[in-house]
Amino acid sequence: RRVGWAVCGLGHFAQNYAIPAIGRSAESKLTGLISGSRDKALAVAGAWGVPEGSVYDYGMQGLADNDEVDVVYVITPNAIHEENVIAALEAGNHVFCEKPFSHNSAAAQRMMDAAKAADRRIMIAYRAHFEPNNTALKEMVQKGELGDIWYATSDHHRPLDPSVERDQWRMVRDLAGGGSLMDIGIYSLNGLIWLLDEVPERLVATTFSPETPDGRFGEIEAIGQVQLVFPSGRRASISSGYVANKKRIDLWGSQAVAVLDPATEYFGNRLTLSTAEGDEMPTPSKPSEQQFTGEIDHFSQAVRDGVPILTPAEMGLRDMHLLEAIYISAERGEWVEVNPDGTLR
Ligand code: NAD
């Protein structure tokens, strides 16, 4: 049977992307909703055919008795993931958790401990691992088609808009855990580690929080910039920002240069390749929207059939450690060394 999913947190991403994707998926079905606003949840339930009895508040009282729900998909502000993830685990469910895993590594570790105690699984919603242009590039790198990649860059930027609700918690450090690095710089970091199949061993970072009349960057960084050195010796440079709108990844191979631009949008990502001499090579673009159903059905298969999870909680925890190392480097103004699990060496 299809695996039953309950969505927890009915904000912008949940209503516009996550719930429609569950609706389109082959292996998964929306069978529950969890929200602080019963009226909002009942309206969403009506639109998606979820029975009123399968609508819960954040305490998730009664969810343990609902056999139609197997997975809870947590889509609340970063620091609020933990209480919902733990409630879902305690109700006997597996958890699909939005990125970043949390606002810090301690919370991520507590969620992993709770999953172990409950004998349930957690997957982090790193959708780029299921995006066809990204996976095409990953396959090319694995086959060595780009040659030696000694340098890579990745930049993830989008404008912050204080007038919309979804960006209000993103300006509060205690809820977001940081600024653009935490929110979208994580795509630069996680994407390069995945594509290059290597975790950096040294890094140095700077952040910038310009003063604006509305003080939007009072608690968080607008810009993050990080230099990475990998165990193989290769170098990479990543950035994040809350000002411009651009999301791209560049791999500078000795045989070919690959550019994903955009790299991680919801729709319309594009891979272009050029030879070492600079001649453009034909590369068909693939539809990006499969990324959402791809990650959702992957987790359904993982919990139903036991397949290994491609973006497990361990990956989410590693990235939280790396983000913390980045902030420490920026604060100290010096290089820091990190272990393969992202912790400071
Ligand atoms: P949002 O503000 O639109 O939605 C958050 C929801 O959580 C709202 O319905 C809000 O009412 C609820 N909520 C519960 N407790 C709250 C609290 N204490 N304070 C504020 N709101 C609370 O935000 P969003 O953009 O949908 O982001 C939610 C999560 O999804 C974040 O972790 C974000 O990083 C992630 N996200 C992922 C993607 C992706 O492409 N994978 C895209 C957008 C957001």
Image (spheres, rainbow, N blue to C red):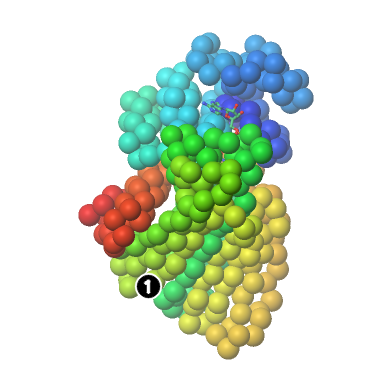
Extreme-bottom residue of the structure: 277
Extreme-left residue of the structure: 345
Are there few (<14), some (14-19), or many (20+) residues within 10 Å of tag 1?
some
Q: Could you say where residue 43 lies in the image, as x and y percent from the top left?
A: 74, 20
What residue is rendered at 71% in x and 57% in y? 268
Report whether residue 55 is seen. Answer: yes
Observer-nearest of 335 and 54: 335
Q: Secondary structure at mark 1?
A: loop
Observer-nearest of 134 and 300: 134
Report whether residue 78 is seen. Answer: no
How many numbered marks are there? 1
What residue is disc 1 on? 234
Q: Quadrant of the N terminus?
A: top right
Q: Is mark 1 within 8 Å of ligand 1?
A: no
Image: 163 above or below 80: below
Observer-nearest of 103 and 192: 103
What residue is rendered at 65% in x and 15% in y? 38
Q: Could you say where residue 125 lies in the image, as x and y percent from the top left?
A: 53, 42
Q: Is residue 325 left or right of residue 249?
A: left
Q: Quadrant of the C terminus?
A: bottom left
Image: 35 above or below 340: above
Q: Is residue 93 left or right of residue 286?
A: left
Extreme-right residue of the structure: 47
Extreme-front residue of the structure: 213
Q: Amino acid at mark 1?
A: Arg
What residue is rendered at 59% in x and 19% in y? 36
Image: 286 above or below 290: below
Q: Picture quarter containing residue 107?
A: top left
Q: Quadrant of ligand 1?
A: top right
Q: Could you say where residue 4 lies in the image, as x and y percent from the top left?
A: 60, 27
What residue is rendered at 58% in x and 88% in y? 277
